[in-house]
Amino acid sequence: MESRITELEIKLALQEELLDALNLTVARQQQQIDLLQEQLRHLYRLQQAGNQPEEQRSLRDDIPPHY
């Protein structure tokens, strides 16, 4: 009976250690997700600011000068 209790205590300790490691991993991943979302929002704002039409462009503006 004593050896069974000891074995269960060891398993419990290992599971607690694994749970702590998984919690740290999830917390780290959430920080990375938050950072990536902020970077995406920043890029979206930059893209929106760059897409403001200042004037109407003609397709002829894109023709190379040698034509």
Image (cartoon, helix red, strand yellow):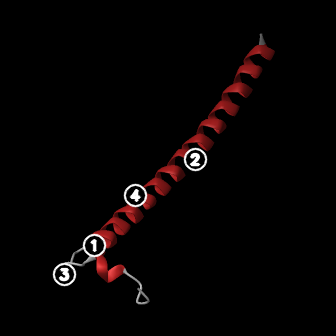
The residue lying at 44 percent from left, 61 percent from top is 35
Q: Which residue is mark 3?
A: 55
| Circle 3: residue type | Glu
Dots 1, 3 in contact, CB < 8 A:
no
Compared with 14, 22 (above or below) is below
Q: Position of residue 15 (x, y in %)?
A: 65, 31
For marks 2 and 1 on the same chain, the one whose residue lies earlier in the sequence: 2
Characterize the local packing of mark 3: few (<14), some (14-19) or many (20 or more) Cα atoms within 10 angstroms: few
Characterize the local packing of mark 2: few (<14), some (14-19) or many (20 or more) Cα atoms within 10 angstroms: few
Q: Element under label 2?
A: helix
Nearest the viewer among 43 and 8 is: 43
Characterize the local packing of mark 4: few (<14), some (14-19) or many (20 or more) Cα atoms within 10 angstroms: few
Compared with 55, 26 (above or below) is above
Q: Which residue is mark 1?
A: 51
Q: Element under label 4?
A: helix
Q: How far apart in space, not on screen, are marks 4 and 1 (Cα)? A: 21 Å
Q: Position of residue 8 (x, y in %)?
A: 71, 20
Q: Name the mark nearer the viewer: 2 or 1.
A: 1
Name which quarter of the figure residue 56 lies in: bottom left
The residue lying at 37 percent from left, 68 percent from top is 43
Q: How many marks?
A: 4
Q: Residue furthest bottom?
A: 65
Q: Which residue is mark 4?
A: 37
Q: How far apart in space, not on screen, are marks 1 and 3 (Cα)? A: 11 Å
Q: Element under label 3?
A: loop
| Circle 2: residue type | Thr
Q: Position of residue 47 (x, y in %)?
A: 33, 70
Nearest the viewer among 33 and 11 is: 33
Q: How far apart in space, not on screen, are marks 2 and 4 (Cα)? A: 18 Å
